[in-house]
Image (cartoon, rainbow, N blue to C red):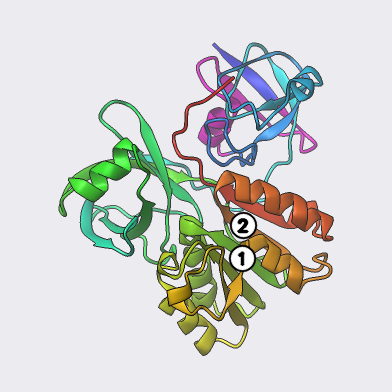
Amino acid sequence: MSYTITLLPSGHTFQAKSSQTIVEAAIDAGVHLPYGCRNGACGACKGKVVAGKVHLEDYQSSVISEDEIKNGMTLFCRAIALENLTIEIKELAITNNIRPKIFPVRVESLEALTHDVMLMKLKLPSTDKLQFVAGQYLEFLLKDGKRRAFSIASPSYEPSLLEIHLRLIPGGEFTEYVFKEMKEKSILRVEGPFGNFFLRDDSKKPIIFVAGGTGFAPIKGMIEEAIQKNMTRPIRLYRGARVLEDLYMDGLCKKWANEFKHIEYIPVLSESLKEEAWRGRTGLVHEAVLEDFVNLNDYQLYCCGAPQMVEVAHKAFIAQGLSEDEFYSDAFTFAAPIKK
């Protein structure tokens, strides 16, 4: 059985099977709804059910309140239609019709960038190329049916060799396997691309990138793609890390700033060590942005990192004058237990 989903304000419609979430059905239909984690943990897909009923599967309680649900709000990545629906959510203006697909990849190389960050390069079959937009992510399909999502760190002009940055999560089944057991030339199955964290190139506004930890991965791909396209919009890259060692690929960021006048790089350490003799910025990365800009109204801002960092930064940037429509984010959610 399937139901008709009508979008407001666009008026577009698509079909959703009774076994699909609204976001899954939209992806299959080539309809671009905002979403991030797809497991009810980031809130990017939050919208309103104007007419009809949905069943809301498990989600993180911090993302949507009971009062919001009572007022018709829901998380469309966890909502399943029980009848025809009219929903209110901003449809994204994406001109391509890239749809996710499942394909095999070979682990071409594994390189430890720090004690807890691994650079993985994945080789696609010679007969296949992945269509994606820099900033999107892949999901690894594990043998037990579980999935693990990681951003693509490479630009789309290199579709046959994909770069992934994996942070070791203590107790994390997949990342511990990658760090301790996985061998080069291993064959994995992935599905993608997913996500709508990508550079909006229809704007002329200066760009501020804010990356925490491996939140640098999708931003790296976006910057490399912008350089390849000869985009000259001013770019400020703020990278937050705990200590100096955590600023992996720091040399690459400095290289961008040295070679391109329109790119500025600002690393920020929250717990710099005395022996590092750090002379750069300190504190929380989003606070460095607030210190540098009295008003963010004229900027476009892209933020990626841990959910708490993204949430706090979002509120602070909006309060500092950033337009809600100019804040783009990807919150990294780590297979944490879902609470209801």
Dot 1 alpha-carbon crowd within 10 angstroms: few under 14, some 14 to 19, many 20 or more: many
Residue drawn at point x = 57 percent, y = 55 percent: 304
Q: Which quarter of the figure has residue 52? A: top right
Residue drawn at point x = 60 percent, y = 61 percent: 199
> In this view of the protein, which residue sits in the foreground, 249 or 224?
249
Tag of residue 303: 2
Q: Mark 1 points at which residue?
A: 209
107 lies left or right of 50: left
Residue drawn at point x = 66 percent, y = 54 percent: 328
Q: Position of residue 143 (x, y in %)?
A: 25, 30
Q: Where is residue 191 in the image (x, y as percent from the top left)?
A: 37, 40
Magenta residue check for 124: no
81 lies left or right of 119: right
Tag of residue 115: none
- The segment highlighted magenta reads 6-30
Residue drawn at point x = 75 percent, y = 70 percent: 291
Q: In this view, does 240 lie above or below 22?
A: below
Q: Which amino acid does label 1 sit on?
A: Phe
